[in-house]
Image (cartoon, rainbow, N blue to C red):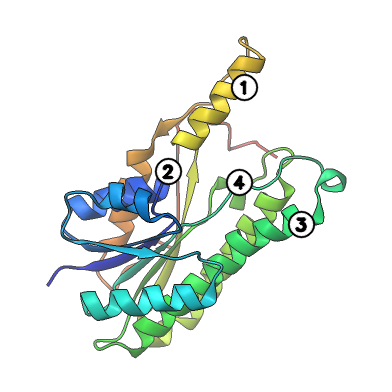
């Protein structure tokens, strides 16, 4: 029987790249995001794709998405808890409270809800167990300037990962975290283009192909149940993470 995974934030960026890697590897893949049309493009040509339109901050819609996938696929082996946003840029006294709350709602509460439904499904199914992989970002380790909202939520994800790893032991539920740095997604390409437009002499950050990050998630997900990657950092070799902050 094919292995099964749900990927949140599957419509673009790291989520879409990871979805394609798992689809090509023959997994049954539940694709969660808000836009049906974009999910259909990710799923195109794959009978093993399950389009699950939901906002991860909508508890009811997300519960329905997980229930639909479990019914269609038979069980849930892995959750790639990926949906998130960059959030506002600025110093703490410049950031509107509503933008802080929106970042926390998506990056932390949304990941909490997805993990909650995955944990419940994995705990109840037979045979019991599964794996949750949280997308932490290298900002879970060291901040970038002027990203207090994003950095705070990503540090919180590390606490979520550790708590799930501890609480899941009794139910054969493993939890690990992947911290990804400067993967070449559409969003980063757009941000870099804006930077160059404003300053053609600007130094561009070192980046890696987003497929490298997606392959790393597949590696974590494919481990036997008795093994777990607790934390993995994958980034461009020359990216200035060590010594940052």
Label 3: how many residues lie within 10 Å, few (<14), some (14-19) or many (20+)?
A: few
- Element type at marker 3? helix
- Mark 3 vs mark 2, CA separation in Å: 25 Å
- Mark 2 vs mark 4, CA separation in Å: 12 Å
N-term mark: 4 or 3:
4
Is residue 15 in view from this perspective?
yes
- Element type at marker 2? helix
Q: Is residue 117 above or below residue 220?
A: below
Of the residues tagged 1 and 3, which is closer to the observer? 3
The answer to the question of whether label 4 and label 3 lie on touching residues, with beta carbons closer than 8 A, is no
- Mark 1 vs mark 3, CA separation in Å: 26 Å
Residue corresponding to mark 4? 86
x and y percentages locating residue 9 in the rendered image: 44, 55
Residue depicted at x 65% and y 48%: 87
Q: In the image, is 46 to the left or to the right of 201?
A: left
Label 2: how many residues lie within 10 Å, few (<14), some (14-19) or many (20+)?
A: some
Residue corresponding to mark 1? 195
x and y percentages locating residue 217 in the rendered image: 34, 54
- Front-most of 134 and 194? 194
Residue corresponding to mark 3? 98
x and y percentages locating residue 70 in the rendered image: 29, 78
Is residue 165 in view from this perspective?
no
- Front-most of 40 and 132? 40
The answer to the question of whether label 3 and label 2 lie on touching residues, with beta carbons closer than 8 A, is no
Q: Residue furthest top?
A: 201
- Mark 1 vs mark 2, CA separation in Å: 19 Å
Number of labelled discs? Answer: 4
């Amino acid at each position: 029987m094919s292995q099964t995974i749900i990927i949140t934030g599957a419509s673009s960026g790291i989520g879409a790249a990871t979805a394609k890697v798992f689809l090509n590897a023959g997994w049954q893949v539940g694709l969660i995001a808000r836009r049906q049309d974009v999910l259909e493009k990710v799923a195109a040509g794959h009978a093993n794709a399950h389009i699950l339109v939901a906002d991860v901050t909508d508890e009811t819609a997300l519960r329905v998405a997980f229930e639909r996938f479990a019914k269609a696929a038979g069980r849930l082996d892995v959750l790639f808890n990926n949906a998130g946003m960059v959030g506002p840029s600025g110093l703490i006294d410049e950031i509107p409270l509503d933008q802080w709350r929106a970042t926390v709602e998506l990056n932390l509460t949304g990941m909490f809800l997805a993990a909650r439904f995955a944990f419940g499904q994995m705990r109840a199914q037979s045979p019991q167990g599964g794996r949750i992989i949280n997308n932490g970002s290298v900002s879970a380790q060291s901040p970038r300037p002027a990203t207090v909202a994003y950095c705070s939520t990503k540090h919180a994800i590390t606490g979520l990962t550790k708590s799930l790893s501890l609480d899941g032991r009794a139910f054969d539920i493993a939890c690990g975290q992947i911290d990804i740095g400067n993967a070449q997604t559409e969003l980063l390409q757009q941000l870099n283009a804006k930077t160059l437009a404003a300053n053609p002499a600007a130094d561009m950050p070192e980046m890696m192909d987003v497929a490298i990050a997606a392959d790393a998630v597949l590696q974590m997900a494919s481990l036997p149940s008795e093994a777990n990657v607790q934390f993995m950092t994958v980034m461009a070799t020359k990216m200035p993470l060590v010594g940052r902050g």
